Amino acid sequence: MGAQAASFPKDNSVVQYWGQNSAGAGVNAQKPLAHYCDDSTDAVILSFISEFNRNGLPVLNLANSCDGTYFPGTSLLSCPEVEKDIKTCQKKGKKIILSLGGASGAYGFQNDEQGSKFADTMWDMFGKGDSKTRPFGDAVVDGFDLDIEGGGPTGYVAFVKQIRKHFAKDSSKSYYMTAAPQCPFPDAMLGSVISSVGFDAINVQFYNNYCSTGGNSFNMDVWDKWARETSPNKNVKILVGVPGSSTAAGSGYVPFEQLQPIIESVAAKFKSYGGVSIWDASQSYGNKDVAPHYAAAVAKLVHNGASSGGFNPKPTKTSTTVAPSPTEPTHSGRPTKPSGTKTASTTAAETPAPTTNPSAVCAREGEKCSTEGQYVCAGKSFGICNHGKWVVQPCAAGLTCFSTTDGGSIYCAQGSGKTDSCAIASNPLSAADPDGATAKPYKSSRVNAELSVTNSDAHSFEAVINARKMDSKPFKNSIVVEFKVPKNIKVTRVTNGKVKQQGNKVKLQIRNLKKKSMSLVFTIKGKVVSGVFAAPDAKSMKFRS
């Protein structure tokens, strides 16, 4: 079964990324690999081979889980404890996959020959090949994952073809090839790759983007269509990739009580659905918003059959933001905050039920509405609930309405498609198959960026910009970003940086805490002087590093 594995690794799986200690220091800091090989996990993806094809051996980065012992004369880690844990996990039936890429580091190929040769290197170092420098000793991983955040697609088709040749040599077990594209379709890095060669599973990152699970542009339908009609492997599984807690990603975290109906809807409708992948284990196991933790709740949902119903895990007491006044749309699920940001007052309470999804409400001019101050999309217009009746107003010329990623409000941006709230409201599977728009990315020869708004109201906004390098030169420790905004928008804060705005021209100076990285995700905050938030002009955004 080496050439093409059958099911990954079973019909409905839970995959945890592990290795980057996303939770950081403290009680939830990343535990040894074997700690996570329990009933809440079917496969663990070790993250990452963060530098490769940069002359010499690749760089393995597992944060606090292997940090100090190198092979003599190299910068390659030797990880005997991880070797031991891999074997322990595999004895329990868990699949262990090694991921290439990630946000930090530097990588990429100049041609197919480099990609093919690197597949040989990976097989010798981590597969059933032979090398004097094997970080995990004689432990053999169950496959490889491509989490390519920058550098472009060159060489990765050749890599996959060559690594599958190696898989085919070993009939003693199944090997898997997976990928982790971001949800905007097609993915800027891996779109052409996954359409050219067969993968066993695709862990789509439905976060840090406008197509996150919580908004009306959640595009599982697009990925399912790709799996059925375009993928070379028509049995490929699409896993819904989610953050393991509110601090695991810049935006897109969905509390479990909101995630459950989404996964149930996806499982009921899409044949390609294969489960849920989570970034990352330290976050999902440490997230106590649902008992005993987020990882266990998701696993029970997935393993018991997402559409079976009757699964109601007990919410735990947590600190939740006090709801704003009825004249403003409600928010939930806060992204990483810019430095210096003051948080809203909080109170201990039972985890609240999710607010009404604005995409499930139909807005027609003059008709009655029940939630004062609520905003919903209506194609290239938006509706506002004003004194019990809908008032429908158009976005500015050339702009389309999008749902904020927290599902609580709307904004206008350049894009295509439509967000017809009335069509969505009549569709009981709207959470899995929304009539959402597709955002226009900010493109140049060197950078591809997507902007999504986490939350917005009549006075303020919070947005995430997800930028990825298209060439093999990473972002350095200092980045300048420039763009133009509409006259009603004032940018006041940015993650790890400073803001200068003169008229409609905005200049951000950002410190890259990773020093070098293939992608950069940062949050901007500001004021809405009048009307609704409208995104910067797609042609105006420029990056300098």
Image: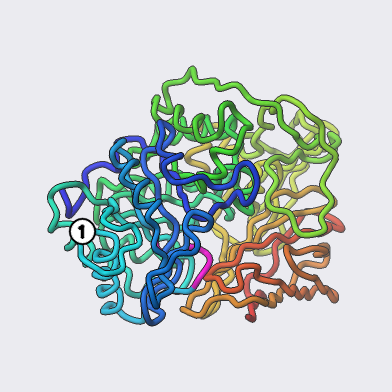
Q: Position of residue 326 (x, y in %)?
A: 84, 34
Is residue 417 visible to us here? Answer: no
Residue beneath the point at 41% across and 42% down: 34
Q: Picture quarter containing residue 317?
A: top right
Q: Main secondary structure of the magenta part?
A: loop
The vertical placement of 321 against 530, above or below, is above
Residue beneath the point at 21% across and 58% down: 128
**Quarter occupied by the C terminus:** bottom right
Would residue 440 be found to the left or right of residue 401 on screen? left
Type of amino acid under label 1:
Lys
Q: Secondary structure at mark 1?
A: loop
Is residue 150 visible to us here? Answer: yes
Is residue 200 inside the magenta stretch?
no
The vertical placement of 469 against 81, above or below, is below
Q: Picture quarter containing residue 185?
A: bottom left
Camera-side residue: 360 or 265? 265
Residue beneath the point at 68% across and 50% down: 335
Q: Position of residue 272 (x, y in %)?
A: 34, 42
Camera-side residue: 237 or 389? 237
Q: Position of residue 424 (x, y in %)?
A: 56, 38
The magenta segment: 100-105
Counting labels gives 1
Badge 1, how many Cα within 10 Å: few under 14, some, many 20+? some
Residue beneath the point at 37% across and 80% down: 56
Q: Picture quarter containing residue 267?
A: top left
Would residue 344 be found to the left or right of residue 111 on screen? right
**Residue for badge 1:** 128
What residue occupies the far top of the structure in this picture?
310
Would residue 165 be found to the left or right of residue 344 on screen? left
Q: Position of residue 63 (x, y in %)?
A: 52, 58
